[in-house]
Image (cartoon, rainbow, N blue to C red):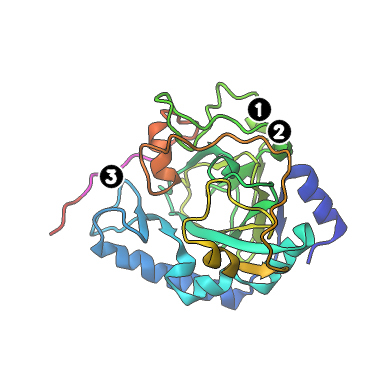
Amino acid sequence: MLNQAQRDAYQRDGVIVVPDVFTPEEVAELRRVTDEFVAGAALITANDDIYDLEESHTLRAPRVRRLKAPHGIHDAYFRASRNGKVVEILKDLWGTVRFDTGKLNMKSAGYGAPVEWHQDWAFYPHTNDDLAAVGIMLDDVDMENGPMMVVPGSHKGPTFDHHGPDGRFCGAMDPERCDIDLTKALPCVGKAGSVTVHHVRAVHGSATNFSGRERRFLLFQYRAADAWPLLGFKDGFEKFQSLLLSGEASVVARLSAAPVRMPLPPAAHQGSIYENQRASGRRYFETASAAPRIAAE
């Protein structure tokens, strides 16, 4: 799936964009299913196991910023998480592939929430860092609708502090205290059906979508088969092994010298990165004004 230039770019920058991975028909199905879930949020008044809601969500104007673990709530998302082209891309990088989890981040037109600067590695350190997130663009993504921004080469640097003023994990870096030039961040833009692949240690974030267009981004996390989570796997060994998509099952963990900061004590606000980052007290990206919430009628 990848040519040598793409492999070199991933090793150098920690991120690549691969066009035309998903067909227009596959994208259309994912959009349709997503629209159905957003409509269903009209019955939801608070975050739950499926929905993470925008602060401006109301029952008359449902606003969803994330679907949690979408691969577990609809077959279209599940099939996307096991897409053969995606698996081949990751095989090109690691040789073996194991699925981890996923989410669908939705930056709705005019108010889609930002994600502050962070490294995925801070949330789930493993025995080695052959991990990446694959982002599927359900809409055309450009500079106007809040693209993911990645600092090239940051995956080779330190693991930055993601703890808040209270000493608890908060899922966000403090830009004023991190020795990194965020102005060098590369925007991950492309047409619907393109995918991004970003390294687990790459520093990234995304701004509010102030445009009049949607930016729905279906993200799935993967790891090499010999990368084992340092915090353990809550669903048990058999489930962990069942997530293997390419390669041979083994109990051998590969160790590599990757700097680790444990995400402990746990975040004060659980549920998603949006909730975690509430406690950070850090706002690099401008936010949209929140509309007043409307009680159930």
Residue 49 at x, y percent in the picture: 35, 59
Left-right relation of 293 to 125: left
Which one is nearer the viewer's eye here, 204 or 232? 232
Report the residue marked by disc 1. Answer: 180
Residue 123 at x, y percent in the picture: 53, 43
Front: mark 1 or 3: 1
Report the residue marked by disc 3. Answer: 291
Q: Does 72 appear above or below 174?
A: below
Q: CA distance from mark 1 to mark 2?
A: 9 Å
Report the residue marked by disc 2. Answer: 157
Q: Does 276 appear above or below 68?
A: above
Left-right relation of 237 to 87: left
Q: Amino acid at mark 3?
A: Ala
The reply to whether the magenta stretch includes residue 163 is no
Q: Which residues are magenta?
A: 287-293
Q: Decide: few, some or many residues near mark 3? Use Cα within 10 Å; few <14, some 14-19, many ≥20.
A: few
Q: Quadrant of the N terminus?
A: bottom right
Q: Decide: few, some or many residues near mark 1? Use Cα within 10 Å; few <14, some 14-19, many ≥20.
A: some
Which one is nearer the viewer's eye here, 149 or 173? 173
